[in-house]
Amino acid sequence: MLGRPWSVDQLTAFRAKMPDRYRVSVDLGAGCGLRQGEIFGVSPTDLDPTRPVLHVVRQVKLVRGALIFAPPKGGKTREVPLPASVSRRLAEHAEQYPPVEVALPWATPTGDPVSVTLYLTDADDLPLSRSKFNPGVWKHAIRATGIPDDRRNGMHVLRHTYASVLLDAGESIKALSTYLGHADPGFTLRTYTHLLPSSEDRTRRAIDKAFGEDQADDDGPEPSDGLGTA
């Protein structure tokens, strides 16, 4: 079941309740649309030195109780736009918590070890595991913020919030599909069609903007609930 994307106020309040060490995970999820394992696997080497994009090339995955590095879901790497705000927060995070080189098997628990320098590790400089992160970090911040602690508000809600913001800004389904790593734009459309602004909304906003009276809601879109997975 697809949960309701968060408003800007909810996202800001939640981010403030996250421990400093893990706060940038919120930025990578809501600011770049990454899945949880992809967030855990981001390295400074994934930032393109020639243009503001992030290369999504790996995830940290839990397989039979063992952590491994693996390609993103579906085996497809991708590029996503790297907003200046996220880039700045990554740099600030790296200053406070210098990236750590981690070695994990590649693709399977018995695969050859691969070393990657990660932005996000735990206090013991070990890679993050969803089995520890979700109950030990995420849920604590959820409860501290007063957001309902249920499946709709798991870490995937950051991706839904990312999709909501982009669609509300007029981004195309095809582009969003690429950024989210969906193989089929039709799947993206079916999943997020309830978030698409109506033609009437787009017309009103376009004219208000042209007349210099752009009054965008600071809290972001207020979409209805929907069903699906992403």
Image: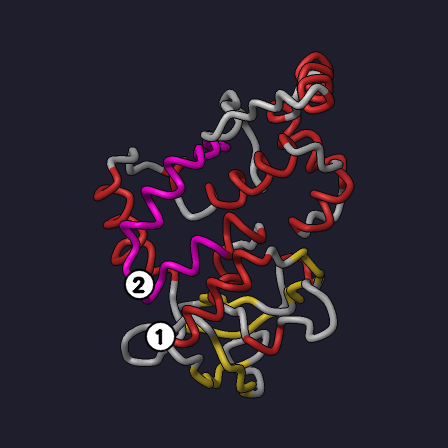
Tell me residue 209's x, y (percent): 68, 24
Within 10 Å of the Cα at label 1, are there few (<14), some (14-19), or many (20+) other Cα atoms? few
- Under circle 1, the secondary element is helix
Residue at image position (74%, 73%) is 50
x and y percentages locating residue 177 in the rendered image = 71, 44
For badge 1, the amino acid type reads Gln
In which quarter of the view is residue 21 placed?
bottom left
* Residue 3 pos. (x, y %): 46, 32
Write the residue at 66% across / 16% down: 201
Task: State the CA–CA distance, disc 1 to disc 2.
Answer: 9 Å
Q: Is residue 65 left or right of residue 139?
A: right
In the image: residue 98, left or right of residue 105: left
Give the quadrant of residue 207: top right
Quadrant of residue 184 within the rendered picture: top right
Which is nearer the eye, 217 or 180?
217
What residue span does the magenta drawing correspond to?
Answer: 1-27
Q: Is residue 50 left or right of residue 134?
A: right
Amino acid found under the numbered disc labelled 2: Asp
Q: Which residue lies at the image location 53% right of the left edge and 56% below the top edge?
A: 85
Above or below residue 52? Residue 183 is: above
Secondary element under disc 2, as helix, strand or loop, is helix
Taking 63 as reference, is 80 above or below it?
above
